[in-house]
Amino acid sequence: MEDEEFGTTITGSRWFNAEPEIEEVEVKTFRQEWLCPKEDCSGKMVSNGYSWPMNPPGYHHTCTECQFTAAPRDGQRFPCEVTYPVKEEE
């Protein structure tokens, strides 16, 4: 007989029928921007909505200054936001 709190296993997973215990963690958010790789250009590469249908997809980016267009590897899309946990001071 299954433990009622942990529910019935369905294809390797299950519903958790109790209230989950959670912990709040302070994080800091950063915006990552891709700087144009062309020499003497100070623009930023911005996703333009086009992509190559690959795995991972190749999201096309266009420079805000010189209009250079390229797709970074690994399915990256810029600008993007990333968050990191705030380290507690020792």
Image: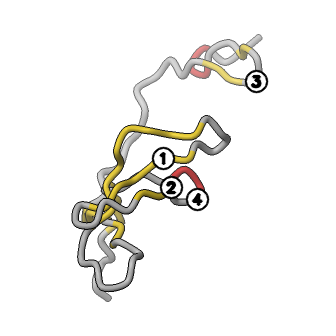
Q: Do the residues labelled 1 and 2 touch (CB within 8 Å)?
A: yes
N-term-proximal mark, 3 vs 2: 3
Q: Residue 26 at what x, y percent from top left?
A: 26, 61
Please state which amino acid type lies under the numbered disc 1.
Tyr
The secondary element bearing badge 3 is classed as: loop
Please state which amino acid type lies under the numbered disc 2.
Ala
Instruction: Give the residue at mark 4.
Output: 73
Residue 59, labelled with which disc? 1
Distance, label 4 to label 3, CA atoms, is: 33 Å
> Which tag is nearer the camera, tag 3 or tag 2?
2
Q: Are marks 2 and 4 in contact (CB under 8 Å)?
A: yes
Classed neighbour count for the residue bearing mark 4: other residues with Cα under 10 Å, few (<14), some (14–19), many (≥20): few
Please state which amino acid type lies under the numbered disc 3.
Gly
N-term-proximal mark, 1 vs 4: 1
Distance, label 1 to label 4, CA atoms, is: 9 Å
Q: Quadrant of residue 21?
A: top left
Report the residue at 31% width, 59% height from top: 67
Vertical order, 37 against 12 (above or below): below
Distance, label 3 to label 1, CA atoms, is: 34 Å
Instruction: Give the residue at mark 3.
Output: 12
Distance, label 3 to label 2, CA atoms, is: 37 Å
Q: How is the image coloured?
A: secondary structure
Distance, label 2 to label 4, CA atoms, is: 7 Å
N-term-proximal mark, 3 vs 1: 3
